[in-house]
Amino acid sequence: MATRRKKGIQAALPIVYGNETSKLPDDAPELQLGHTHQWTVYVRGPNGADIAHYVRKVVFRLHESFTNAVRTIEAPPFEVTETGWGEFEIVIAVHLHDFPERPIKLTHMLRLFPPEDQAVIDDPSRPDLLVMERYDEIVLNEPTEAFYDQFLQNISKTYPMTGPVWNRGAEVTEAEMLDRANIEVLRQMEELRRRIMEKDQGLARVKAELAAGAAMQGVLGDSAGRL
């Protein structure tokens, strides 16, 4: 019997994916290997919502230097924890119950340090933890009726507006970043104004020199006529 699908229907499946990282303690044995941080890469539901009713498994492809670089997680929590010293791109394949043969491919750049070009949010409850994550939605076209019914029963109707980076130990807040941006804009405007004034002054000097030259030619012409 053919599987019945919801014609003309799309289902948006919310996920949050990213990584958490913190510095290793001074007595961590991994320090002897040159490692500096412990990190966890994950696929989760917004606000900790259960995603197991639509996510069947998640495959994480780590850097080839890791033992068993391809990690398959078939039950929640869909995450991998490791230690290391470097940042690298992780390929994530999300396999769904409704379309097991067509995994959703994602990429995430593992972060051990806050990016300089992004705002961070201070979280006093977790002082040394850096979180780099993003919210996304997996859109399914014409899901099966059974999947769609279960999806409607379990899905949350509201999702948080999450920023890209949380870092409770960071000194730079979003407001400070905006202040710095405003100061930089003002500095650039002042620099542009200064350059325009310099060009205007230069143009005025050229005009004055041309006028003086023309006047001198007139004087010389008059003198030659009298001779």
Image: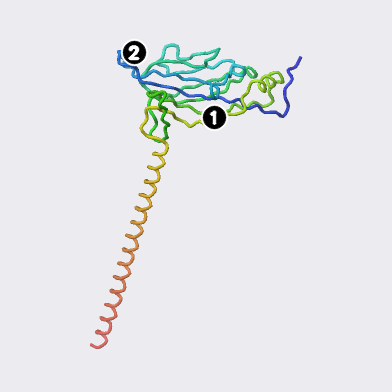
- Seen at 30% across and 71% down, the residue is 208
**Is 183 left, or right, of 95 in this rendering?**
left
Q: Return the residue nearer the eye: 186 or 30.
A: 186
Query: Circles 2 and 1: CB distance less than 8 Å?
Result: no
User: Where residue 37 appears, x then y in whole percent?
Assistant: 36, 19
Q: Return the residue nearer the eye: 86 or 114.
A: 114
Q: Quadrant of residue 19?
A: top left
User: Where residue 181 appears, x then y in whole percent?
Assistant: 40, 43
The answer to whether 177 is drawn above or below residue 101 in the figure is below
Q: Disc 2 versus disc 1: distance between alpha carbons?
A: 36 Å
User: Where residue 206 appears, x then y in whole percent?
Assistant: 31, 67
Q: Which residue is mark 2?
A: 30
**Is 18 left, or right, of 5 in this rendering?**
left
Q: Which residue is mark 1?
A: 160
The answer to whether 129 is drawn above or below residue 215 in the figure is above
Numbered mark located on residue 70 in the image: none
Q: Quadrant of residue 33?
A: top left
In the picture, which quadrant includes the C terminus?
A: bottom left
- Seen at 46% across and 22% down, the residue is 90
- Seen at 55% across and 28% down, the residue is 136
**Is 106 left, or right, of 87 in this rendering?**
right
Q: Residue furthest right?
A: 1
Amino acid type of the residue tagged 2 in the rendering? Glu
Please report whichever mark, 2 or 1, sits nearer to the chain's N-terminal start: 2
